[in-house]
């Protein structure tokens, strides 16, 4: 498959992840997913951390975020006809996806992983993503038998009306990873108002 720049992604707020059907059905009995605090936002010193050498291209097969108990298979994602990132099937709660026309996790550049925060039955794979903290580890198993190990630099939340496309999806000179789900508060009329984004960079492999 020919790989293309993440700049090909437009309207990148991943709206299909964000219906909030479970919260709407459950009402006061349900608790909205955690949101990152201001202390987890990016600072100038985050890029000073050590970086591991880039890995060759290889499709990923599984993502693990030990701090929040995530251990999920990955499927390839493409773009919708409107140019936004597609999403995994909502009924598969423990499934995430990666943008397979772009950078693979561990490769030089910006790799993108997305997953649902919930579905009609309850919390899904990235329900607790907003509680991840700087310094946490994200591990991605690859089909070449190796595992890319990332360290979290920042966790931020953005309103869908002001989503920073270039910051999230732009090219990087080092191996980086973005993990994305819904967040930013919840409205019964419009669903989740934005997206939670984890920013991480490669610090090891095995």
Image (tube, grey):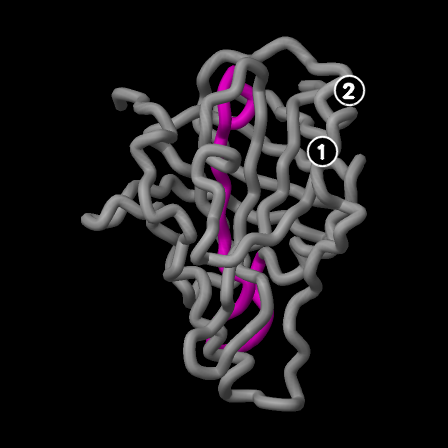
Q: Residue furthest left?
A: 81
Q: Percent x, y for residue 184?
A: 58, 63
Q: Out of 16 and 160, give the one closest to the viewer.
A: 160
Secondary element at tag 2: loop
Residue beneath disc 2: 49
- Rendering coords of residue 112 (x, y %): 48, 36
Would you call the spot at circle 1 few (<14 residues within 10 Å), some (14-19), or many (20 or more)? many
> Is residue 206 visible to us here?
no
Please report the bounds of the magenta region as a residue range: 105-125
Residue 108 versus residue 141 in the image, above or below: above
User: Residue 205 location in percent, x, y?
Assistant: 68, 19
Q: Is residue 44 left or right of residue 96?
A: right
Task: Sort mark 2 into few (<14), some (14-19) or many (20+) by Cα contacts within 10 Å.
Answer: few
Q: Residue at x 47, y 52 (%)?
A: 162
Kindly identify which numbered label has been placed on residue 153.
Answer: 1
Q: Nearer the viewer, residue 61 or 131?
A: 131
Q: CA distance from mark 1 to mark 2?
A: 9 Å
Question: In the image, is residue 191 above or below residue 82?
Answer: below
């Amino acid at each position: 498959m020919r790989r293309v720049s993440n700049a090909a992604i437009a309207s990148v707020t991943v709206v299909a992840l964000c219906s909030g059907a479970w919260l709407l059905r459950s009402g006061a009995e349900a608790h909205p997913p955690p949101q990152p605090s201001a202390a987890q936002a990016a600072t100038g010193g985050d890029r000073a951390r050590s970086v591991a050498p880039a890995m060759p291209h290889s499709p990923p097969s599984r993502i693990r975020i030990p701090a929040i108990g995530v251990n999920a298979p990955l499927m390839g994602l493409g773009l919708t006809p409107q140019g936004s990132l597609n999403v995994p099937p909502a009924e598969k709660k423990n499934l995430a996806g990666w943008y397979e026309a772009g950078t693979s996790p561990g490769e030089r550049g910006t790799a993108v992983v997305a997953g649902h925060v919930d579905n009609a039955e309850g919390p899904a794979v990235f329900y607790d993503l907003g509680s991840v903290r700087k310094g946490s580890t994200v591990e991605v198993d690859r089909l070449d038998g190796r595992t890319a190990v990332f360290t979290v630099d920042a966790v931020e939340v953005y309103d869908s009306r002001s989503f920073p496309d270039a910051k999230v999806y732009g090219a990087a000179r080092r191996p980086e990873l973005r993990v994305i789900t819904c967040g930013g508060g919840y409205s019964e009329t419009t669903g989740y108002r934005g997206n939670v984004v984890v920013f991480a960079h490669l610090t090891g492999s095995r």
